[in-house]
Image (cartoon, helix red, strand yellow):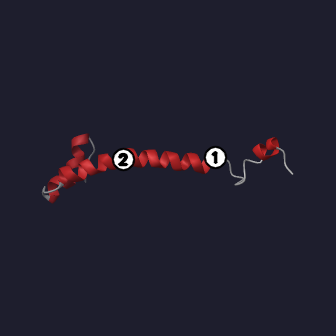
């Protein structure tokens, strides 16, 4: 039978530590931040001509080709 310290050193029952937990938390945070941004872009481009939507990134200083 393992002592509590032995279980801690073994990184828990999954034997993989907390890396997957933090990866999931980070990706959820990014998704939460980027979703409203993309929704605003989609709503702003709704109903505009394709050429205007296609050249929109040039407003931000990026070159469109």
Q: Nearer the viewer, residue 20 or 45?
A: 20
Look at discs 1 and 2 and give the one toward the viewer.
1
Which residue in the structure is indicated by mark 1? 18
Instruction: Find residue 7 and name its label.
Output: none
Residue at figure coordinates x 78%, y 44% from the top left: 9
Residue 10 position, x and y percent, is 77, 48
| CA distance separating discs 1 and 2 | 24 Å
Whole-percent x and y of residue 47? 13, 57
Q: Secondary structure at mark 1?
A: loop
Position of residue 31 in the picture relative to residue 47 (left or right): right
Quarter of image, res 5: top right
Name the one closer to the observer, 11 or 62. 11
Q: Nearer the viewer, residue 17 or 45?
A: 17
Answer with left or right where residue 62 lies relative to residue 27: left
Q: Residue at x 55, y 48 (%)?
A: 23
Label 2: how many Cα within 10 Å (few below 14, some 14–19, many 20+): few
State the image coordinates of residue 44 (x, y, percent, origin top left).
Answer: 19, 49
- In this orientation, does residue 12 appear? yes
**Label 2: which residue?**
34
Question: Could you tell me residue 65's position as x and y percent?
Answer: 25, 54
User: Can residue 55 be seen here?
Assistant: no
Residue that appears at 27% across and 51% down: 39
Tell me if label 1 and label 2 are in contact, CB under 8 Å.
no
At 62% from the left and 47% from the top, the residue drawn is: 19
Give the total of numbered labels.
2
N-terminal of the two: label 1 or label 2? Answer: 1
Q: Residues within 10 Å of mark 1 (few under 14, many from 20)?
A: few
49 relative position to 41: left or right: left
Residue sticking out furthest to the right:
1
Secondary structure at numbered mark 2: helix
């Amino acid at each position: 039978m393992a002592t509590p310290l032995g279980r801690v050193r073994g990184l828990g029952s999954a034997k993989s530590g907390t890396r997957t937990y933090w990866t999931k938390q980070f990706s959820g945070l990014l998704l939460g931040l980027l979703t409203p941004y993309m929704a605003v872009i989609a709503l702003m481009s709704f109903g505009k001509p394709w050429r205007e939507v296609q050249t929109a990134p040039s407003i931000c200083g990026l070159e469109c080709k």
